[in-house]
Amino acid sequence: MSSQTSGAMFLKAFAGLYLRDLRVLSRELGPFVLRVGMQPLLFLFVFTSVMPHISGGNPMAAGGGAAFGTILLPGLMAVAIMFSGIAAVALPLSSEFGITREIDDRVMCPLPVWAVAVEKVCFSALQSIVAALLVIPMAILIPAKSVYPEIHNWLLFAVVLVMSSLLAGALGLAIGSSVPPKNIGLIFSIIVVPITFLGCVYYPWAGLKQIPWLKVAVLFNPIVYISEGLRASVTPSVGHMPIWAILLALVFFLVVLGRFGIRNFLRRVIS
Amino acid sequence: MIVAIEGLKKTYEGKQPVVALAGIDLQVNQGEIFGLLGPNGAGKTTTIGICTTRTLLTSGLVRIAGIDVVKHPAQARKHIGVVPQFNTLDRSLTIYENIYFHCRYFGLSHLSAKDRSNELLNQFLLAERAKAYPNQLSGGLAQRVQIARAIAHRPTVLFLDEPSAGLDPQSRIAMWSAVSELRKEGITVVLTTHYMEEADELSDRVGIVDRGRMLALDAPQKLKERFGAQSVIDLKLRNLDGAEAIASELRQRDGVQSVEATPEGLRVIAGSADGLLPEIIQFCSRLGLRDISITEPSLETVFIHLTGRDLRE
């Protein structure tokens, strides 16, 4: 078989997998919107609408001052991206690898097995992008004082958004392919919550200058680069890491988590 | 040659390495229904796993439709249909969509995939359940959907791993007829089973495997003949006095391997009972034949002969 026809065959199989995922998602649009929307909705409501109305001020907003909403916008987008990645890849993979072995039919399609894993990541990225974009209208509508994105560099925004979404999918793949189904619930407590709270979501990285050890420690957390990348492109007026460092780190974590995830995926599928 | 296996070995690594296949050779021809018969743990599923690119071989060579499954797994899969041991239908999709998207994975356009899905739903009498979800189906129906899905991309060879495991007798018979029907479409079928009736009923040829080795490989009838599997004819007689005389007369007859006296009469072991019965009845009527029972040769008796063990031990 020539490489050209193989290429066409792979593309069609990949497209077929993507269509399948779109079909499944289209049936669960309501739950999907709830899943990705609830967290930022409530966060914005409580911290930027309720709190400012409560006399005595918002202790959490002390660091950010009046601009807490501005700090929160990229942070909440980052959380939305990461949650989608985990919900779209890790949770379904974990059950598909479990008792039902539903993944089998897709693994048996005429496509290298690693590409089946890559498809999962790409489809999750689509959901992450939608989830992140949904946060923007919420940030305009919900807070007492509307937060508008100030995107000057659209290319940077697009690159960061896509890279972050792929990274979240790769994280989901790494988790979904390495954690046994019965432990998947634990993942939220031992991975998702820590990387969120230590992911420069609710505070800019530069704000950590008072706590140097933490400022260094969080550099191992991929979510930091998602938050900071979005901060650099959506609310550039807030201090952020250098853009080259952000992009480099996004690529680095994408490669590391992607490779790790694909390797485990192959191991689960092929004996 | 659709399936060509040469010197296939597989060892599962671990603290205690398990040798699943100790060197298997096998050739399956176009249009054939081939049965791999053996007890659980014999290496059947491993063999199928390797043929279907899901299990990596330790050494040997496997070609499906001429394509090396190790070097070109994705290309080989185009020729392979698989019905696994368990229900692996996509729970998020309807029955129709399970088949439709399977077609799309294999590169069919929307219209061809739609036509093919409807065609298969009709062929497998599933049209009424097209909109149902897999978890709403009985085991037998789900199995039928799995077969329909597996052949949707018109594979050259269909692998069925323990197709009747967990099916009620009626569904099993329905599955057998569905598999036999595939012959008409020219699809080669390789199935594994530990039910000798199933192997006997369905297969053109049977390979008997045990402990990772192929012990015998031939048409079921030939296996039975070759490995001394004989019909056993038990005769119960009222008058045992003349039995020995009849026994020596019977021993002279062609096809009779041995005749032994039993407490109630005689036991005749013969290659084939055809034409022999009327004679036996005639001989024995003098002594008052009370009862006669015949045990046909079966693959079970072949298996016992080859391994000294029962299939289900």
Image: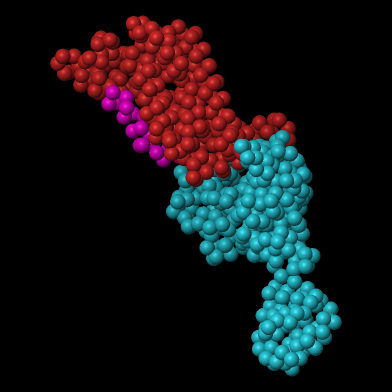
Chain colours: A red, B cyan
Left or right, residue B123 beside residue B299: left
In this view, the residue in front, A166 or B13, is B13
Q: Which residue is drawn at 70% across and 54% down?
A: B209
Instruction: Give percent across and percent down for residue A252.
Output: 53, 16
Q: Is residue A133 visible?
A: no
Q: Which residue is drawn at 47% across and 30% down?
A: A175
Vertical position of residue B57 compared to residue A215: above or below: below
Snapshot quadrant of residue B245: bottom right
In this view, the residue in front, B222 or B139, is B222
Snapshot quadrant of residue A106: top right
Please identify the dominant SS of the magenta region.
helix
Vertical position of residue A187 compared to residue B203: above or below: above
Q: Residue at x 64, y 37 (%)?
A: B13
Instruction: Give percent across and percent down for residue B289.
Output: 69, 89
- Say which quadrant the N terminus of chain A sits in: top right
Vertical position of residue B177 compared to residue A47: above or below: below
Q: Which residue lies furthest to the bottom in this view?
A: B286
Left or right, residue B257 beside residue B96: right
In this view, the residue in front, A113 or A136, is A113
- Say which quadrant the C terminus of chain A sits in: top right
Magenta highlight on residue A49: no
Instruction: Give percent across and percent down for residue B300.
Output: 68, 64
Magenta highlight on residue A25: yes
Q: Is residue A174 visible?
A: yes
Instruction: Give percent across and percent down for residue A172.
Output: 47, 29
Give the magenta part as a residue range. A22-43
